[in-house]
Image (cartoon, grey):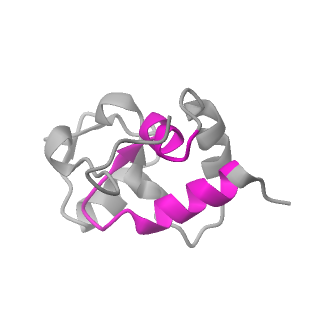
Amino acid sequence: MSTELQDRVEALVADIPPGRVMSYGEIAAWCGYPGAARRVGAIARQGTGDLPWQRVVRSGGYLADMGDSTWQSDALAAEGVTVRDGRVVEYERVRWAPSDASPSS
C-alpha cells in the first residue's frame, strides 16, 4: 500500500530528466515534506525498479551508493553526468528543479 508521500516521490522521480539529479532532501521538500529526506531514501530502497533512482543523490551531489557497487555512477555516466570520487562533478549545474516555483512548504 502506497502513501501520499510515496506517490508524490515516485511521480517526481519519474519526471527528473536524463542527465539531471535531485537530492533526497530536495525531493522531500518539493513533495511537501521538508526534512523527510530519510523517508524519501526508504521509498527509494523499496521503490519500483522502473523509475530513474540513479538520478537521486545525497546532499551535495554525493552518490547514494557509496559501497563497492558502481551501478549509480555507471547509470549517471551513461546519461552524461560525470562522477568522481563518489560525487557528481558540477553538481550545481546538473541539479534539477521541477519549475522555477519554490518547493512546497
Residue 55: x and y in percent read 39, 55
Query: Magenta span has 90?
Result: no
Answer left or right for 103 relative to 79.
Answer: right
Task: Tell me where the magenta segment starts and ends, as one range.
Answer: 5-32
Q: Residue at x 65, y 66 (%)?
A: 48
Task: Determine whether, in the image, residue 2 is placed left or right of residue 34.
Answer: right
Above or below, comparing residue 75 to residue 50 in the picture: above
Residue in the image at 18% along x and 63% along y: 80
The answer to which of 105 and 88 lies nearer the viewer is 105
Q: Picture coordinates of residue 72 (x, y %)?
A: 40, 53
Q: Does residue 98 appear anywhere in the picture?
A: yes
Percent x, y for residue 20?
27, 57
Q: Is 13 in the magenta?
A: yes
At x 42%, y 34%, the residue is 58
Residue at 42 percent of width and 67 percent of height: 15
Q: Nearer the viewer, residue 69 or 105?
A: 105
Q: Where's the N terminus, which quadrant? A: bottom right
Q: Is residue 89 visible?
A: no
Q: Main secondary structure of the magenta part?
A: helix
